[in-house]
Image (tube, helix red, strand yellow):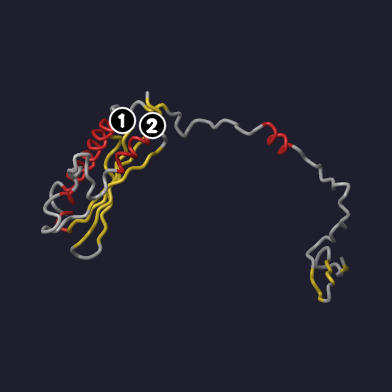
């Protein structure tokens, strides 16, 4: 059973090879299945999209996908299903590359539906941000809901438990402050009073 740290390191290495223009060990472009990979990079107008991952609760992976698109594509039939398929393709790519790098299989099971938000920059151009959670199988993790252990050292705990009981140190020669808010009256003189009905007295 892989530990959480081992899985995180493996997925991090996968993500290091997913930037635009990344090449494999044979010098060939790495294909994830993104829209930016379609067409010629010099001649055709490319659609910029990409993805990232984040971890939750020690045993969940969240895939975040973002892309530019036109408003007509948002209203096109099957937009939601295409978005879901794109995230599933990314999950398949992560599992395939993880197997190639670590030699171990990565189990990702979809947890919930795709959560997406579409925003526009103009009447024509928009962008979409979508995410989906996946349960990571075979993770040796306690999760974040378990109670934390008291890991304070004994010496530090004893120091926190000490209480002077309101007593001053023997070598403390300071005078007790006058109750109330002190007021500086100039020429180095400071006066204070117990309350608003009391007279000011020099400290």
Image location of residue 62, percent across then percent down:
33, 40
Quadrant including the C terminus: bottom right
Circle 2 packing at 10 Å, graded few (<14), some (14-19), many (20+), is few
Among the two numbered marks 2 and 1 on one chain, the one whose residue lies closer to the N terminus: 2
Marker disc for residue 20: none
The one of 95 and 72 positioned closer to us in this rendering: 95
Question: What residue did someone put label 2 on?
Answer: 6
* Residue 35 as seen in the image, left or right of residue 110: left
Image location of residue 134, percent across then percent down:
31, 35
The residue depicted at 42 percent of the width and 36 percent of the height is 57
Marker disc for residue 102: 1
The residue depicted at 83 percent of the width and 76 percent of the height is 187
Give the secondary structure at mark 2. helix
Name the image quarter holding residue 2.
top left
Quadrant including the N terminus: top left
Name the image quarter holding residue 96.
top left
Give the secondary structure at mark 1. helix
Task: Please determine whether, in this image, residue 54 is positioned above or below residue 66.
Answer: above
* Residue 175 as seen in the image, left or right of residue 157: right
Task: Please determine whether, in this image, residue 119 is positioned above or below residue 182.
Answer: above
The residue depicted at 29 percent of the width and 45 percent of the height is 131
Q: Kindly report which numbered mark, 2 or 1, lies closer to the viewer in this rendering.
A: 1
């Amino acid at each position: 059973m892989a530990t959480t740290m081992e899985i995180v390191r493996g997925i991090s290495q996968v993500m290091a090879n997913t930037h635009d223009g990344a090449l494999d060990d044979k010098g060939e472009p790495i294909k994830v299945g993104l829209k930016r990979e379609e067409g010629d990079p010099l001649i055709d107008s490319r659609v910029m999209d990409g993805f990232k991952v984040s971890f939750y609760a020690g045993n969940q992976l969240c895939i975040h996908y973002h892309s530019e698109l036109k408003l007509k594509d948002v209203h096109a039939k099957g937009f939601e299903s295409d978005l879901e398929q794109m995230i599933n393709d990314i999950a398949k790519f992560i599992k395939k590359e993880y197997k190639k790098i670590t030699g171990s299989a990565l189990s990702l099971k979809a947890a919930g539906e795709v959560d997406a938000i579409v925003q526009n920059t103009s009447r024509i151009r928009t962008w979409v941000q979508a995410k989906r959670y996946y349960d990571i199988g075979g993770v040796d993790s306690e999760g974040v809901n378990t109670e934390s252990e008291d890991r304070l050292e004994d010496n530090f705990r004893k120091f926190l438990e000490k209480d002077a009981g309101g007593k001053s140190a023997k070598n403390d020669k300071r005078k007790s402050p006058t109750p109330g808010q002190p007021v500086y009256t100039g020429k180095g003189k400071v006066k204070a009073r117990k309350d608003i009905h009391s007279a000011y007295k020099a400290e």
